[in-house]
Amino acid sequence: MTTRPWIVDDDLWARIEPLLPPWPERSPGPKPVSDRLCLQGILYVLCQDTARQLLPLELGFGSGQTCWRRLDRW
């Protein structure tokens, strides 16, 4: 099991989560990566000053493209 570096702690996530739009119930396709993991991936890319395409899948945040699309959706 891979240990994820938690950039967003539980207290901060409790404040952010209510501000995000809910995922559509009848959304086609596989179950999406959680909003918290996508936010972690977005912040990881920003903090590491790297291209989103280089987000390591081993961290478990989803792909850089997934995180980018979620940010666009928000």
Image (tube, rainbow, N blue to C red):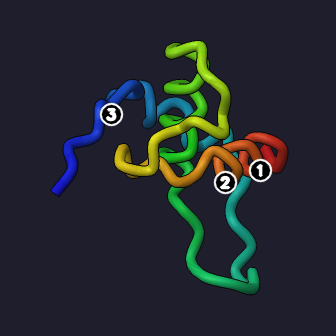
Q: Which residue is mark 1?
A: 69
Above or below — where is 53 with respect to 47? below
- How packed mark 2 is, by other alpha carbons closer than 10 Å (few <14, some 14-19, many 20 or more), is some
Q: Residue at x 59, y 13 (%)?
A: 49
- Which three-letter amino acid code belongs to the residue tagged 1? Arg
Quadrant of the image containing the C terminus: top right
**Disc 1 secondary structure class:** helix
Q: Which residue is mark 3?
A: 10
Q: Which numbered disc, 3 or 1, marks the residue that appears first in the sequence?
A: 3
- How packed mark 1 is, by other alpha carbons closer than 10 Å (few <14, some 14-19, many 20 or more), is few
**Quadrant of residue 66 within the rendered picture:** bottom right
- Label pair 2/3, CB-CB below 8 angstroms: no
Quadrant of the image containing the N terminus: bottom left
Q: Is residue 26 left or right of residue 2?
A: right
Whole-angstrom CA distance, mark 2 to mark 3, is 22 Å
Q: Which residue is mark 2?
A: 66
Q: Position of residue 4 (x, y in %)?
A: 28, 40
